[in-house]
Amino acid sequence: MKKFLTVCLICLTPLYAVASVDDKSADVADSAIQQESTIKWQPYLGVNMGINASEVSVHGEDFFDFGGVFNFEAGARYNKRYRLALNYQSRAEVSELFQILFGHVIAISNDAVRINGYYDYVSLKHFAMYIGAGLGGDWYDYKITNRADNSEKSEHGFTFTAGATTGLSFSFWHLAIDLGFSCDYIAYPQILSYGPNIGLRINF
C-alpha cells in the first residue's frame, strides 16, 4: 500500500509544478474557457491498453511479472477541464518463468469496474495534461497448480481496487489520443501494477 501511495504522489507532482505558475496565466485560461461554447457536458467513449509491471502477493507467494491491461470507458467531459467516467478494466497475471519450470504456476485474472475522475490542469485547444484517480470493485479468479503432484487450488471472489494516472492528451476533430502512466492497486490477491498506456477517445 505504501508503494501505491508513493506512485500516486509521483503522478500528482506535475499538478503541483503547474500550480506554482503565476495566477495571471490561470486567469487568462479561465476567461477563455468562459467565452467558449456554453456546452457543459460532452459524452465520450474511450479505450486504452498498456503494458504493466506487477508485484503480486497471494497465499505467501510473491512474484513479479509483466502483463497487458485493457480498459474501456464511458463518460462525460464537463467545462473542458473535468471528466467523470465508468471504467471497465481486464488484466491477467501469471507467475514468472522460474516458478513455472521448477515449482508451481499461479494464474490470476481480474475484471474491475471503477468510477474514475480526471482533471486537465493544462487545457489548450489541441493539447492537455491531466491527472486522474478512481475507486471501485474487482472480481478475481486465481488458480495455483503444483507441478510436483499436479494438485490445484483455486478461489474466486470480490475485492477493492483503486488507481491513479497522469498523462498527455492530443485532440483533433472529435478524437483524442492519450499517452499516460498509471498505477493500480488490487486488495486481494494483492497486486500493485504500474506502467505506460496509450488510449483513444471519441467525443460526441
Image (cartoon, rainbow, N blue to C red):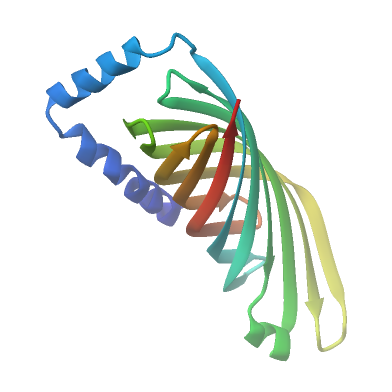
Residue occupying image coordinates x 49% and y 12%? 39
Q: Nearer the viewer, residue 27 or 137?
A: 27
Residue 31 coordinates in the image, percent (x, y): 26, 14
Which quadrant holds the C terminus? top right
Residue occupying image coordinates x 37% and y 14%? 36
Residue 189 coordinates in the image, percent (x, y): 66, 57
Q: Is residue 196 left or right of residue 189?
A: left
Figure check: 47 above or below 104: above
Residue 98 coordinates in the image, percent (x, y): 64, 87
Residue 191 coordinates in the image, percent (x, y): 58, 58
Q: Is residue 137 left or right of residue 37?
A: right
Figure check: 52 above or below 25: below
Figure check: 50 above or below 48: below
Q: Nearer the viewer, residue 136 or 28?
A: 28
Q: Nearer the viewer, residue 12 or 84?
A: 84
Residue 137 shows in the view: no
Residue occupying image coordinates x 64% and y 47%? 71
Q: Is residue 165 left or right of residue 138?
A: left
Q: Quadrant of residue 74?
A: top right
Q: Is residue 16 left or right of residue 128?
A: left
Residue 90 shows in the view: yes
Q: Which residue lies most toward the front here?
A: 173
Q: Quadrant of residue 129?
A: top left
